Structure formats: C-alpha cells, structure tokens
C-alpha cells in the first residue's frame, strides 16, 4: 500500500540543494536494490475520492516520470526568465520529442 498523503516530509529537501541531491541518490539506490511486486498494489491520495484504488508499481513509477517532466517544464520557464539556458529537450515530454523527430517539427523549434 502506498499512501501519497501520509508520508514523511523533510523541508530541508525543498530548500537545500545538497540535501535534495542526497535524498534523490538514496531513493535511486533503494529503487535499484529492491524487488517490487509485479502485480496489483493499492494507492491512496487526496483527490476528492475516497479509499484505496488498485495500481501497479510500474504504473506509479511511469506516472512519476511523466509528472517530473511537467515540473521540469515549469523549472525551464522560471530559468528562462533568469536567462539560464537548458538543453533543448529539458522539460519536454518524450512523446513530443518523438513527434518532433518524426520530421513534423524540429527539436530546435522549442528553444
């Protein structure tokens, strides 16, 4: 069971880049080292619904990756105001990059 609302929070992760990096490294190591159930799991979050719903670890990790791209897009916009340049594909969904590489729109057009 994963309860997204009932989790430990560390305000230092939000304000200290070194602490955030350490935390990400620790989590990445745990993800690599741990075996995960391939079947159903239950998740809960405060989205207006009640109770637990069925999901899988794979689905949750894929959603996390997608949601991270969303946050990277916001970071990209904020840094653009500060004249910070990022790689052309930073904060752009993989499906959008594939679409652009298919000849319909070059990646450089996103800059």
Image (cartoon, rainbow, N blue to C red):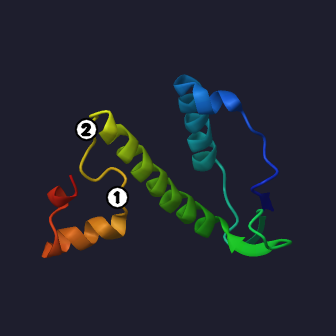
Mark found first going from the N terminus, 2 or 1: 2
* Residue at 57% across, 31% down: 20
Mark 1, residues whose alpha carbon is within 10 Å: few (<14), some, or many (≥20)?
some
Q: Quadrant of residue 49?
A: bottom right
Q: Quadrant of residue 44?
A: bottom right
Circle 2: element type: loop
- Where in the figure is residue 39, as x and y percent of width and height? 70, 74
Q: In this orientation, which residue lies closer to the viewer: 34 or 103?
A: 103
Circle 1: element type: loop
The label number, if any, that marks residue 85 in the structure image = 2
Q: CA distance from mark 2 to mark 1?
A: 14 Å
In the image, is 48 to the left or to the right of 14? Answer: right
The label number, if any, that marks residue 92 in the structure image = 1
Above-or-below relation of 10 to 60: above
- Where in the figure is residue 30, as x and y percent of width and height? 64, 43
- Where in the figure is residue 105, as x and y percent of width and height? 16, 70
* Residue at 78% across, 47% down: 7
């Amino acid at each position: 069971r994963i309860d997204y609302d009932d989790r430990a929070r560390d305000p230092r992760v939000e304000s200290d880049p070194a602490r955030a990096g350490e935390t990400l490294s620790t989590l990445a190591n745990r993800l690599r080292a741990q075996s995960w159930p391939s079947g159903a799991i239950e998740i809960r979050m405060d989205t207006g619904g009640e109770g637990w719903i069925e999901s899988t670890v794979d689905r949750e990790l894929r959603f996390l990756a997608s949601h991270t791209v969303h946050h990277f897009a916001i970071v990209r916009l904020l840094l653009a105001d500060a004249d910070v340049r990022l790689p052309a594909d930073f904060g752009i969904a993989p499906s959008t990059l594939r679409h652009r590489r298919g000849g319909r729109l070059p990646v450089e057009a996103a800059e």
